[in-house]
Image (tube, helix red, strand yellow):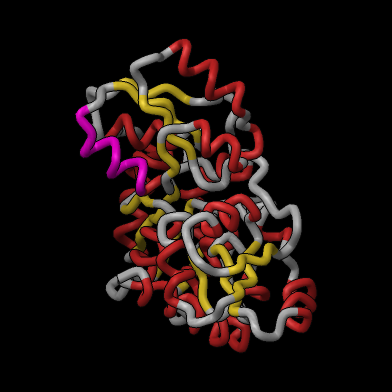
Amino acid sequence: MSSPLHEEIKQLKEEKNAIILAHNYQPKEIQEIADFLGDSLELCIKASEIDDKDLVVFCGVDFMAETAYILNPDKKIVIPDLEAECPMAHMLPEEELIKAKKEHPDAGVILYVNSIAESKQHADTLCTSANAVKVTESLPHEKILFGPDNNLGKHVQKRVDKEIIPVPKGGHCYVHKLFHVEDVELKRKEHPNAIIICHPECNDDVQEACDETLSTGGMLKFIAESDAEEFVIGTEVDMITRLSSEIPGKKLYPLLEGAICETMKLHTLEKVRDALKNEAPEVVVPEDVASKSLKAVQHMLDASK
C-alpha cells in the first residue's frame, strides 16, 4: 500500500493531527488506510477515547459521525461524503418517537445506535447489535420501546423477559433484508462443512436457519477462536474484506454476493484526502441535542463494560 495518494493522506494526517475511523463495511481501499476499524460499538468506544487528536475523519454513515461528535464536541468531525446516510436511521424521526413515548409512558426507550441524533436525545440508552441484550437487561423497565430495527428487536425479545415494543413498525436495514432462508439452504449444499453466521438485522427466520447470529465484531472474534476452517458470512460483503485480512487461512464465503450497502461505498481515497485537506464536510450536532443524547450514549458505554 504505497501510492502518491496514500502518501498524501499519510502526510495530511500528520499535519492535521488526525485519525481515520472506518466501519467494517467500508471498501478495501478505505479499510487499508484506516487507523481503526470496527463495528458500531467498537467505533463508539474508540470515539470516546480520542483525546490526542484534533481532527476525526469518519468513514462510515451519518449517525456514526454524529455519535463521534456527541462524544467529542470539542473536536472537528468530518465525513468524506455527506450523502453517506443510513436509510434505517432515518426511518425513526423524532416526532414518531415522541408519539410512541406518549402512548407508552411506562416504557423505557432503547434506540439502536443506528438512529439520528434528534431521536437519540429522547432515549434512555442506546445499543448496538453487539450489546443489545445486555443493555436491555440494564434498564429497570418491564416494557421497552425499541427501534428503529425491528429484527434486532425480535432478536432481543427472544433473549429477555421484557416486552419489546417496536418503533417504528417495519424499521429495517435494506441490506440485511436481502437475505432469505433459501440463500442459507443453498450455501449449506455448496459448503456442507461451513458454519453459517448472520447478523441480527436479518429476518428472524434467516437467523433461525443459520448456525450463529452475531454482530460484525462478534463474527470476527468467533471465527478467530473457532477451529472450523469454513464460514458463510451473512452480512454486508466487505465484512469479508476485514475478516480475510485479520484471520488469514480461513475459507470465507458471502451468504449473498449482492449484499452491498451503497452508502458505505460513497467514500473514496480521493474524498478522504479532500476531507483531510479541507477539514470538511464537517458534522455538527446542535448543542442541546448533543448534550441530551450524550446521556444515552454514555449509559450504553457504561452498560457495555
Of 272 and 90, the residue lying toward us: 90
With respect to residue 290, does 222 lie above or below? above
Q: Position of residue 195 (x, y in %)?
A: 36, 27
Residue 139 vertical position relative to residue 40 in the rendered view, above or below? below
Residue shown at 47%/55% (left/top)? 129
How many numbered marks are there? Answer: 0
Q: Residue furthest top?
A: 190
Query: Is residue 24 magenta-colored?
Result: no
- Between 219 and 134, the one nearer to me in the picture: 134
Q: Is residue 38 visible?
A: yes
Q: Is any part of residue 276 visible from this angle?
A: no
Prevalent SS, magenta region: helix
x, y percent for residue 81: 60, 52
> At 52% across and 31% down in the image, what residue appears?
209
Report the magenta residues as a range: 218-227
| Residue 60 horizontal/vertical position (percent) | 51, 52
Please name the residue shown 33% across and 53% down the image. Answer: 36
Q: Is residue 287 above or below residue 99?
A: below
Q: Is residue 296 left or right of residue 106?
A: left
Q: Quadrant of the C terminus?
A: bottom left
* Residue 89 at x, y percent in the picture: 65, 59
Image quarter where the N terminus lies is top left
In the image, 186 versus 52, the foreground residue is 186
* Residue at position x 25%, y 26% in the image: 228
- Can residue 223 be found in the magenta stretch? yes
